Amino acid sequence: MIKLVLGGARSGKSALAERIAAASPELVTYFATAVGDDADPDLAERIARHRDRRPPAWETVEIAFGGNLVGELQACEGAVLVDSLGIWLAGFPDFALEHASLTAALLARRAAGHLTVLVSDEAGLGVHPSTYVGRQFRDALGDLNQAVAAIADDVWLAVAGRALLLPTEPSL
């Protein structure tokens, strides 16, 4: 199964994704796309909070900024939690990413019977970016989210610590 968890900043999306992954009978591998450094103490504290919530049995794989997430997904057996697509996307020049390789890896994992939970920011709900680069990132992330949502079995929206399972087809 492919499960996409969307939400804004501090919405509870990561905690929701962790609960979904924890329900899997498979060993969970956590792909962390935010890799802290000493230059940003706020980011380091956020990463520590996420790390402290993870069960000790989970394996953590750090994906460098713009790193080979697709290859790691292809090589991984068992359940996977990716937190988060937005940080991973930010590592690509001009946020240019071909979605096909990611969606192919996700579909192959589903065909093999492995759970994949992906966290991403729903950037379109936030403040309108005042810069070209900000708008470029928001649009690229929106396109990526749509590509993953199109193949996901479930899409969740986290808002203020609550979760809503979105319908696969909107009612007209």
Image (cartoon, rainbow, N blue to C red):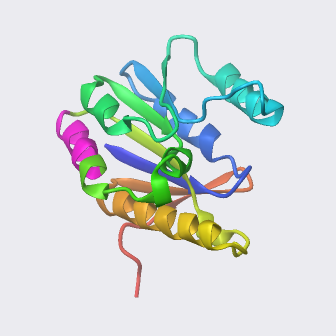
Q: Residue 119, relative to residue 79: is it above or below?
A: below
**Residue 76 sits in which quadrant?**
top left
What range is drawn magenta here? 103-112
Q: State yes or no: residue 107 in magenta.
A: yes
Residue lying furthest right in this view? 41
Which quadrant is the N terminus positioned in? Answer: top left
In the rendered image, residue 44, in percent from the top left (x then y), is placed at: 75, 28
Horizontal and vertical percent position of residue 100 = 25, 55
Q: Residue furthest top?
A: 57
- At 57% from the left edge and 67% from the top edge, which residue is drawn? 138
Q: Name the quadrant of the C terminus.
A: bottom left
Specify the quadrant of the image occupied by residue 7: bottom right
Direction from residue 21 to residue 128 in the image, left or right: right
Q: Is residue 23 above or below residue 89?
A: above
Left/right of residue 51 with respect to residue 33 in the rendered view:
right
**Is the stretch drawn in magenta largely helix, strand or loop?**
helix
The residue at 61%/64% (across/down) is: 123
Across and down, in percent, residue 137 comes to: 55, 63
